[in-house]
Amino acid sequence: MANLDPEMMQESTATMQSALPDFRNTEIAFSYLSDKELKQMSWLFTLMNKPWLVQTGSTIGRWAVQWNIPFARSIVKATLFRQFVGGASLLKSLPTIEKLAHYKTQTILDYGVEAKESEVDFNATLRENLRAIEFASGNEFVPVVSTKISGLASNPLLEKVARGDELSRAEEEAYKAVIKRVESISLSAYEKGVSVFFDAEESWVQAPIDDMVNAMMRRFNKERAVVYNTFQLYRHDRLDYMIQTADAARSEGWIFGSKIVRGAYMEKERVRAREMGYPSPIYPDKASTDKGYNEALRYLVEHNDTIASCNATHNAESCMLMAKWIDELRIDRNHPHLNFSQLYGMSDHLTFNLADCGYNVAKYVPYGRVEEVIPYLLRRAQENASVTGEMSRELDLIHKEMKRRGLE
């Protein structure tokens, strides 16, 4: 390091710190909302902060939409759908995409349909993903499309492949079709100048997903990061696996695409491990998870020359650490290999303050008809209800902004 005058260093450090995002700045966080929209958000998040109400409403809501109970769809559409979904279709999501772009925030498109189990459904999901890539290729504010391989394949088939069981001829053909679908999506993204995130899933189906996504990265990530794998870092084995993949990418000459998340299946993972008598793959506590996550994040930032990454988190500490490390290492804030993302409808204090400070940030924007995205919506409500600390923080910020505007 060069020898600098201590006073200059102190002044430089103070300047750098003052330029970092302030996640308490509610004026920036909620500037995209009108007074009416902010009041509606406050009302909805207050309801979601009541676990008993969310649990009861989730059960009734799923049943009411499924059975076409009068007004059920319109109620969901006016509440959860409006908060967490970009639109019922790609075209109907355009106003959301354009609004986010106005506030320096990009969009990651996510077709919000889940729990499909037939070849007809898998092929329909494939076609929709290809339409989303085509749509993204014509919109500079949509650099990425996200998808789940479980939306393109049968979970029992993935589980059987993960165990190494012998497949029947029909299962072999079905698995070849899965690989072909994944290849079609990756090839289209490569040809159209778009990137694709493949989500992580349960540990007992993740191995074949890793194999498929790694094969696509080897093939398509020679010149830019087209394909990204996702790493759930509440699993204690994933940091080592991520580093192994990064080493392989460097030695083989391709760009490693890594999206990191804390994880989405903690209770399911622990219950299954207990019932089946194997060690849980999940860290024993939150502190261990946070430590592992931030170690992975530091690794990705330090290796930005060979790794394209997305820090997909609602954790303010992890976002601030990445922002600081980017500045400390004198990396451009808009470096294409260093990205943040949060879910649409949540953690606006992170997204828009990061964007306002010049970092690359995007919202995950799901789209689809109400009946298609209801499982996603109910999960969002349940997750918000269960993470009371996060929800309380979000509500506090909303109320702070309402007071600032003189609305309460």
Image (tube, grey):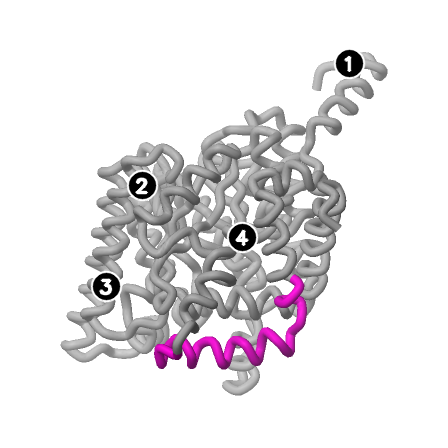
- Tell me which label, 2 or 1, sits earlier in the chain: 1
- Residue 77 lies in magenta, yes or no? no
Q: Residue at x 46, y 69 (%)?
A: 203
Which amino acid, mark 4?
Gly
Give the magenta-colored segment's residue range: 46-69
Q: Identify the residue under disc 1.
A: 4
- Tell me which label, 4 or 2, sits earlier in the chain: 2
Residue 134 in percent (x, y) is at: 24, 43
Q: Residue at x 43, y 70 (%)?
A: 375
Q: Residue at x 19, y 69 (%)?
A: 120
Residue 178: mark in rendering = 3
Distance from Cα at disc 3 to Cα at disc 4: 32 Å
Task: Quadrant for residue 74, please give it.
Answer: bottom left
Q: Nearer the viewer, mark 2 or mark 3?
A: 2
Residue 50 in percent (x, y) is at: 67, 71
Which amino acid, mark 3?
Val
Which amino acid, mark 2?
Ala
